[in-house]
Image (cartoon, rainbow, N blue to C red):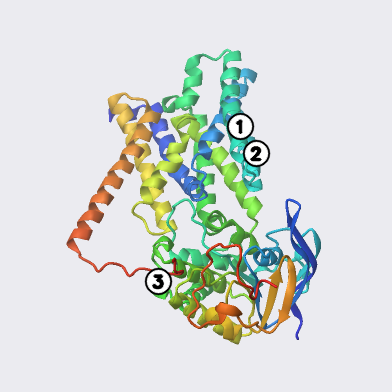
Amino acid sequence: MELFQYPYMQRALIGALVIGLAAPALGIYLVQRRLALIGDGVGHVALTGVGAGLLLNRSPVLVAVIAATIGAIAIEIVRARGRTSGDLALALLFYGGIAGGVLLVGLSDATSANLNAYLFGSLTTISPADLTTIAVLGAAILVTMIALRPALFAVSHDEEYARVSGLPVRTLNLLIAVATAVTVTIAMRAVGVLLISALMVVPVATAQQVTRGFRSTMAAAMALGLFAAGSGVWVAATADTAPGASVVLVAIASFLVVAVAGGVWRVVRRRTTPTAAPAPEPHEVVLS
Amino acid sequence: MTSPVITVEHGVVGYDGRPVLRDISLTVGAGEVVAILGANGSGKSTLIRAVLGLVPISAGSVTLFDRPLRRFRQWARIGYVPQRLGAGGGVPATVREVVASGRLARRGVLRPPGRADRAAVDAALRAVGLADRAGDPVSTLSGGQQQRTLIARALAGEPELLVLDEPTAGVDAASQEAFAGALRDFVARGGTVLLVAHELGPLRPVISRAVVVHEGRIAHDGAVPDPAGHHAEPDHDHVHPHCYDEPAGLWSN
């Protein structure tokens, strides 16, 4: 606990908590539209932005935001078109993004430690200015995702129905794409581009095993994200492990605990409350 | 006939250059209950998707409530019921949450739900007989109950026109009856209905006009045609064994 007297550890904790809260609030929409791995793809593209930033001596995070936004919008355009070659286009973008990033970082004066900081996160080197960026952007993501929940739910749940409801479907889709890019870039400092998707997706996957509705899933996922971020940083501080990896491992451990506990609970309930077999649906066709 | 709610004039729709609808003209007046009938692949679903602007028409025009589709913005006047609920990514949603999306057309994106919204959602759930399932995840419902959820979602927006794509396909008898009742109430309050159906079943008494689509054209527009051949038998089980030599009936000349 003594470690948290140091300002750099306090910044690490606050940054992790903000990201732990904001990432699942966005991630739930990505999971709902079967884009759970989009954060990974956008992260790859963001790495090219980091490389360009280091090479041009500009703020790597700022350039990464721009690169990730362009990448996320490109992915959204490919998705909206629904062409069969869409996954190949995404693959090109992902691998182009990470190769470009490695190449550009190599060309700059940055060391491999610099690259590692973005690949796997570097919570303890967050500066006060970084923390302000993370807090402001994280709060913006959080407010948007919660305030627009009914509309974002509708468009992620049934896009055609949303269109016939007169919702601004394209704008909402682009909003999710841009929010993904922003979340990826601020989370990059905490867990790194290779682990970003975990914070967006794993708390949602954990929550939806026990929840019944969308709103309760969102609340539970945000609580789980907060818990994983807080205890992950604490584990990292006490056991001297990598903070990003610790946060993600706590999140995955929570998933396993809930999955096993949920399974045991269902078995116990089935044994203790004998219920009549559910009535089968009437046959719709007769197969001869 | 009063002022038309839907007008399609010489509508043509094609996918990848292959025409699905050729020169369709159709008018639906206020208070009418029009069923679009046709065999699988006849283009009947494409017709209502074109009416709603979900597929673009390559020629002709679509007019909704006296406005060209391109300039139509009053989507709250239309309730759309798709064929089935998308599977989604596995995030649970309660019946009430799905039905509440039906209010967005009326409420807009930014305004939080108020008392009128909640009352309309409650009324829609009661209309389809799902009030007691409001808090259950939709994934735990039967196919027929999921279909009723989608109908409640459309009703929650208090539309003037309901557009339904095969609302009774693969739906159990109880749900078909519940649906026919909800439709009767909607029509009794002056609503207009355009629905696509493979066969009418318990909906038959509600339908005021039938349009038969055959090979992308309208083959019949008027009274509900009587089922032909073995389809007319009272205990007819509607089976499609995918054989090529189907007996001559309603869909084949």
Q: Residue at x 42, y 31 (%)?
A: A11
Q: Is residue A252 above or below residue B229?
A: above
State which quadrant residue B216 falls in: bottom right
Label 1 lies in what chain? A
Query: Mark 3 vs mark 1: which is more N-terminal?
Result: 1
Q: Residue at x 36, y 26 (%)?
A: A6
Q: Which mark is residue A74?
A: 2
Q: Could you tell me residue A268's position as x and y percent? A: 20, 56
Q: Nearer the viewer, residue A250 or B151?
A: B151
Label 2 neighbour load within 10 Å: few <14, some 14-19, many 20+: some
State which quadrant residue A14 falls in: top left
Q: Residue furthest left?
A: A272
Q: CA distance from mark 3 to mark 2?
A: 46 Å
- Label 3: which residue? A282
- Residue type at mark 3 is Pro
Q: Nearer the viewer, residue A8 or B232?
A: B232
Label 2 lies in what chain? A
Q: Nearer the viewer, mark 3 or mark 1?
A: 3
Q: Could you tell me residue A248's position as x and y percent? A: 38, 34
Q: CA distance from mark 3 to mark 1?
A: 48 Å
- Label 1 SS: helix
Query: Mark 3 vs mark 2: which is more N-terminal?
Result: 2
- Label 3 SS: loop
- Residue type at mark 2 is Ala
Q: Nearer the viewer, residue A285 or A192?
A: A285
Q: CA distance from mark 1 to mark 2?
A: 9 Å
Q: Could you tell me residue B122's position as x and y percent? A: 47, 75
Label 3 lies in what chain? A
Q: Nearer the viewer, residue A46 or B111?
A: A46
- Label 1: which residue? A93
Q: Is residue A63 above or below residue A219?
A: above
